[in-house]
Image: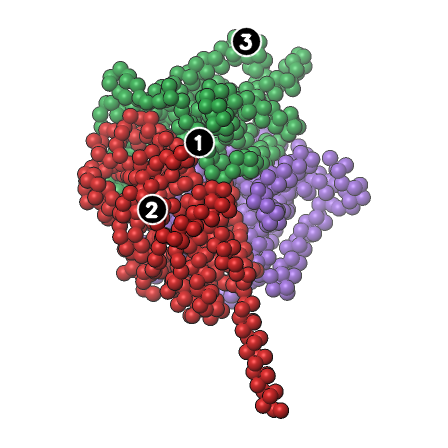
Amino acid sequence: MKNLLSVSASILTAASLTMASALAETKVGMITTLSGGGAGLGIDVRDGFMLAIKQSGRSDIKVVIEDDQRKPDVAVKLADKMIQSEKVDVLTGIIWSNLAMAVVPSATAQGKFYLSPNAGPSALAGKGCHENYFNVAWQNDNIHEAAGAYADGAGYNKTFILAPNYPAGKDALTGFKRYFKGQIAGEIYTKLGQTDYAAEIAQIRAAGADSVFFFLPGGMGIAFLKQYSGSGVNLPIVGPAFSFDQGILQAVGEAALGVVNTSQWNKDLDNPTNVAFVKSFQAEYGRLPSLYASQGFDTANLLISAIVKADVNSPDAFRKALKSAEFKSTRGDFKFSSNNHPIQSIYAREVIKEGDVYTNKTISVALENHSNVYTKDCKM
Amino acid sequence: MTLVLIAEQILNGLQLGVTLFLMSAGLTLIFGVMGLINLAHGSLYMVGAFAAAAIAGATGSFILALIAAMTASAIAGTIVEISVLRRLYRRDHLDQVLATFALILIFSEGTRWVFGSFPLYLDIPHYLQGPVTLPGEIQYPLYRVTLIILGILIAVFLGLLISKTRIGIKIRAGENDREMIAALGVNISKLYTMIFALGAALAGLSGALVGAIQSVEVGMGEPVLILAFVVIVIGGIGSIKGAMVGSILVGLTDTLGGVFLPKVLQLFMDISTATNLGSSIASMSIYILMGAVLIWRPTGLYGSRL
Amino acid sequence: MEAYWPLWVALMIGERNINLLTLSLFVLIPAWAYLADEPFTITLMTRAVIFALAAVGLNLILGIGGFVSFGHAAFFGLGGYVMGILAWHAQGYSPLLEWPFVIEGTKSMPVIWLVSIMVSAIFALIIGAVSLKTSGVYFIMITLAFAQMMYYFSISWSAYGGEDGMSIYVRNNFPGLNTLDPIQFYSLCFVLLLISLWFVSRLIKSPFGLALNAARQSPQRVQAVGLDLHKLQLFAFVVSGAITGLAGALFADLNRFVSPNMFGWQLSGEFIVFIIIGGVGRLFGPVIGALLFVGLEHFLGELSDFWHIYLGIILLLIVLFSKSGVIGLIAKKEVHSD
């Protein structure tokens, strides 16, 4: 009798424990930009992320989404809310490096996991790295390094480079120069938010360059491309994907045709996960995905892969599960470097027109299996 | 540092100035005659750009797009004036600041609600694309030359309007003494609405013209608004001439400062410090200009003495 | 205008009682949050208190002095950056200055506050000396210009983060308190707000305050009586900048982060908005305004992605139907004639 009781007790305990862990919810806090000028990127990340969650069919992941309005103090307030009030286990979503710098260090210090679907500032890759911080997109420099490698490979000898005068801009030009071995015909730091580039284009014309590299995210890039195409300066342009993503291309139009840009993802990457992703994204949202959407999608799938292997309430096991990154990414195989950034190939793609829509076509691999230069600074 | 480059930069400064003039002309009239601080002027600029993008997309005609821009902004301006701003003329400037600040919020998010969160496509028409060769073998974009000419024409038109027509007399009288012209029988409400609609139309036109070579997105109006305020302060509130001179000054300072300051500093220090410091000072240059003007003439170059 | 409220409400609530009611909200809400284990509400209230402090500073020159400063974010940012620079050097164990004498960083709040107040006051002296020579919209623009200059300068000052800003990982120290505990930090900020309110109210009632008030209403008469107008206004501007600077240091501590956004013109605009919706020139105007705004931001944000539209509409309604802000709406007596 006693044996029967103890056996049933242990079965019941085992059953309830299993049920408990099956019902154990993982709460995710997504802080991203959903209003104002840069909202397109945040909306893409959110949509990609939620598509993956929906496709997983799991009911044990709860996502809380908030709008940071691109303001650092609002992002900090929301992070506080998510950690203190919503009691989330994992944070994600931030698009901009300056907001990431405001939120990530204190979030990881409080023991929360942060999975970045976009911003990859060098500070968080090098000295400020943390075992709870994982970047699923890239380290900021990578895309620019690839552009430099492409320019070098394409035989450009005198490139004129420009970027806005803020940390990401400086990182961009430094990254480009790291892999570009030719001469720099001229280097300009423009004003952040500047919309008129006539002066800079005039300098490009006067400098005797054979190519141009620029990093001008958002509206700045649109303005530059339009003005450049009307100026009569016909030098080839290389840039990072940030001025040529699916959302922005429609606003630039013809002026972007033929420009080569570097990205870790493109919609024509030929692996089954990506093919399915592009199709399902278009079916669900009625538009083509951008690289931001793919990053959101991959971040969610990384998270799901970890949840399958470990419980978020056992941080060491969960961290290990995250690091092993056993999930199918839209970029093919996925691997983390020692400082938790992706080791991946970066492609050069060209802007083309498909029917009525402007989009990108992959033309070559700019950098293969590329890690980042800050691994030695990271003392994890 | 060739003469061609310098000439091109001067043209760029002029073109920026002309764009600013369209914004500031309306702003200075509105403030000069009606005493209204209109923070929502940037929103009217944005409305014009979005209307132009929508109509250009639908019809393919740039001219129609420009007309649509002016009409849409004028209508938006009129609605706002009649429903909200009319009640605020007697009130403190602060109340006007708050009300127009609230309008910025409504317009920005409202535009995003209607048009979505991604920037829109607007391009210059084919017949205005490409460069044109100016005397001295300077290659300069045709569209920008057109803008400069258009701006000068509008400035002349406004100048004539103010000095030679009955409306112009009413405007000048209104700037001088609001209550008196009401006492003299001028229909103030109608006059104010007309002035506001005119200012709004100019802002919308500016938005459309500039949106064609920049980007059409939510929030595009606020940086221009700040610049326009700097212009009218330098030029003097209420003066169209002041708005013209102020715009040119600001346009030239901003453009030439950004280009030449780093180069000048490079004579004294290494390239990266010079570029860094030069860019910083260049961004501050128009404010330094404004401060200098105000110290010399506390009410701007052509403003009435207080 | 009071007709929009029931008569008995208008008759019964005087300004004094509104002030007491507001203060009690600032005590009761965090107390409830503490007991109900809702630390985020305490964080929200801290944000409201700090914004209130910033606006109290602005109200001195705007409401009492009559000068609309559209650049008070300059002082807010200055206070924040003072905190950021001092704490950053302290957490990195590197001195600020090595020659001619060594200045180490510090993470002690009282020291940081003192330095913030002094630095803001010095800048206010310079900015005020130049700006107060103008008036009206010119004054608005020149104060805006100074704030913009600091904004662009801080973006390009890469030594201290540039646009990325600086993260201060752990909150600074105050003797005897655990400043990371939300309720303790809140109490600290609230006490500072109370002290500032008391200070400003004494100032308003003093001969200086009366002269300033008079100068706003009738500058010529004040000058005729023999008072130095410029000195009066400059002194008010300096005190005003110092108080807002202190708020900036607290804000940086709240967010454990400093960035050029603290110099932004949108923030200057928001401070003005707090004062207007609360009631210009009223002692508690900025306090009520800040609380309302933070509350609206929070609750409306949950309604929709486009909540700015609702916020705009509410602000419009407040300005259209209330002559002197919320206090004016509820209280019966006018404090200043206009």
Residue B170 — which label? none
Residue B165 — which label? 3
Q: Residue at x 39, y 32 (%)?
A: A253
Element at label 2: strand
Circle 2 or circle 3, nearest the eye? 2
Is B32 on the left or on the right of B272, as rendered?
A: right
Marks 2 and 3, how far apart at CA: 60 Å
Q: Colour of chain C?
A: purple
Q: Position of residue C299 (x, y in %)?
A: 62, 49
Amino acid on which the number 1 mark rests in the picture: Tyr
Q: Which quadrant of the rendered structure holds the C terminus of chain A?
A: bottom left
1 and 2 marks on the same chain: no
Q: Position of residue B68 (x, y in %)?
A: 52, 22
The residue tagged 1 is B121
Amino acid on which the number 3 mark rests in the picture: Thr
Marks 1 and 3, how far apart at CA: 39 Å
Circle 1 or circle 3, nearest the eye? 1
The chain to which mark 1 is attached is B
Q: Are marks 1 and 2 in contact (CB under 8 Å)?
A: no
Q: Position of residue B58 (x, y in %)?
A: 49, 26
Q: Nearer the viewer, residue A229 or B176?
A: A229
User: First in sequence: mark 1 or mark 3?
Assistant: 1
Q: Is residue C299 visible?
A: yes
Amino acid on which the number 2 mark rests in the picture: Ser
Marks 1 and 2, how far apart at CA: 23 Å
Q: Colour of chain B?
A: green
Q: Residue at x 38, y 36 (%)?
A: A354
1 and 3 marks on the same chain: yes
The chain to which mark 2 is attached is A
Element at label 3: loop
The residue tagged 2 is A263
